[in-house]
Image: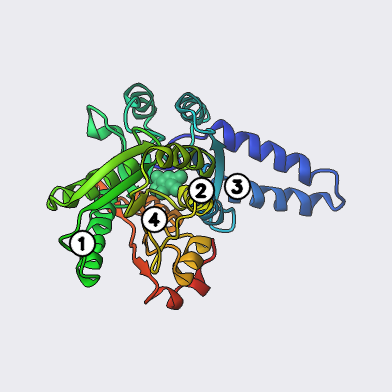
């Protein structure tokens, strides 16, 4: 796949190297050195990555994973674009990768729909597209090669199953349970999957009532706003399901201000997603009951896929990254290794 075209990127890089290297002494040596360097540059695999934004700690860790993986030392030239939560910026970034004739396009789609046209363009340009984190809904599955990310519906189900077991342990299995859900970005696979997964388990329990599901965009600020509104309407809350840690931080702040206690010994059971370090600390101290891990360290998995493609190997349509569930019982074993 690679080497089918000499992209503008490569030509530009070669020129830049030429300029950098010229002007020294020892002409013969310089020329040879330059040729080697240019050859080495030419070998780099050019990867255009469109990240959807930087809304959460998870996202920052996901970006870091990409940037640490696709380095020159590892044989890559990374062109990274941050779309700042706008699909139109992602589409622009993808078009610019196409015009630069990159070797691979990787992108984390902010929402599932709206990608057909630009992905057709990538297909026409014969650039393989790898979907990262969330999924795309396209009419033709051949518009992307594979997707690397989490099993979001599985995460949602795990949250529900954990709650069922916890209520049983607490002798509350038959009690009326009122639930509030803070949802992430609308139309995003992580939101859709976590919502559906949890609802599936909730439907199996007639005594569970989802009082409200409020969208809070995966951000702390929006979660605070939504939580204030919710608490002005509902005071009898048993469970908060918050679809990422950033929203949980905001919700916990508001709950505390309003006089609620949370977690293992509190009024409100708290279920969070992502499992970033600062949230795991709250699991350890008992303010969050459970954190369903979502693994942002996807760089190596994506690199693996690229290497398979380079070697002509057969690729699956979906690769799930491994994930755990953290409670006060097991979190101590993992917290010190958490880098994000
Ligand atoms: O859980 C959240 C984020 O799509 C898995 O997006 C991702 C979610 C993640 O910003 O924190």
Give the mark nearer the N terminus: 1 vs 4.
1
Q: Indicate the quadrant where residue 173 lies.
A: bottom left
Q: Looking at the rendering, in which quadrant would you find the N terminus?
A: top left
51 or 170: nearer the viewer: 170
Secondary element under disc 1, as helix, strand or loop, is: helix
Disc 2 from disc 4: Cα separation: 16 Å
Q: Nearest to the eye among marks 2 and 4: give it.
A: 2
Tell us which disc is closer to us: 3 or 2.
2
User: Residue 241 got which mark?
Assistant: none
Relative placement, left or right, of 270 versus 49 is: left
In the rendering, which numbered label is found on residue 254? 2
> Residue at 51% of width from left, 51% of height from top?
66
- Residue at which label 4 appears: 272
Tell me the CA gap for discs 3 and 2: 53 Å
* Badge 1 or badge 3: first in the primary sequence: 3
| In the foreground, 187 or 264 | 264
In the picture, the disc for residue 41 is: 3
Whichever of labels 2 and 4 marks the residue nearer the N terminus, that label is: 2
Q: In what element is the residue under mark 3?
A: helix
Query: Which residue is under mark 1?
Result: 164
Q: Residue at left 40%, top 69%? A: 265
Q: Eyeballing the image, is 43 above or below 226?
A: below
Residue 4, compared with residue 244, is above or below; it is above
């Amino acid at each position: 796949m690679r080497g089918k075209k000499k992209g503008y990127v490569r030509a530009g890089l070669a020129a830049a190297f030429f300029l950098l290297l010229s002007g020294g002494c020892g002409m013969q040596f310089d020329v040879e050195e330059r040729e080697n360097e240019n050859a080495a540059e030419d070998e780099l695999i050019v990867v255009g990555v469109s990240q959807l934004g930087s809304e959460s700690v998870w996202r920052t860790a996901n970006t870091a994973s990409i940037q640490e993986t696709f380095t020159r030392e590892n044989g890559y030239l990374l062109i990274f674009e941050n779309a700042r939560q706008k699909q139109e910026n992602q589409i622009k970034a993808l078009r610019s990768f196409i015009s630069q004739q990159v070797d691979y396009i990787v992108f984390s789609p902010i929402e599932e729909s709206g990608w057909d046209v630009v992905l057709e363009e990538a297909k026409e340009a014969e650039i393989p597209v790898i979907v990262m984190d969330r999924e795309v809904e396209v009419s033709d599955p051949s518009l992307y090669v594979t997707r690397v990310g989490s099993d979001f519906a599985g995460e949602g189900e795990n949250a529900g199953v954990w709650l069922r077991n916890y209520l049983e342990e607490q002798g509350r299995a038959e009690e009326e349970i009122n639930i509030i859900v803070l949802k992430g970005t609308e139309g995003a696979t992580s939101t859709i999957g976590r919502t559906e997964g949890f609802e599936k388990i909730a439907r199996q329990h007639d005594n569970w009532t989802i009082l409200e599901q409020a969208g809070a965009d995966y951000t702390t600020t929006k979660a605070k706003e939504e939580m204030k509104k919710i608490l002005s309407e509902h005071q009898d809350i048993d469970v908060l399901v918050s679809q990422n840690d950033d929203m949980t931080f905001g919700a916990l702040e508001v709950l505390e201000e309003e006089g609620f206690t949370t977690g293992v010994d509190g009024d409100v059971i708290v279920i969070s997603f992502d499992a970033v370090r600062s949230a795991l600390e709250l699991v350890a101290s008992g303010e969050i009951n459970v954190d369903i891990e979502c693994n942002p360290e996807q760089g190596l998995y994506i690199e693996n896929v690229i290497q398979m493609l380079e070697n002509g190997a057969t690729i699956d349509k979906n690769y799930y990254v491994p994930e755990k569930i953290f409670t006060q019982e097991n979190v101590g074993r993992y917290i010190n290794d958490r880098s994000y």
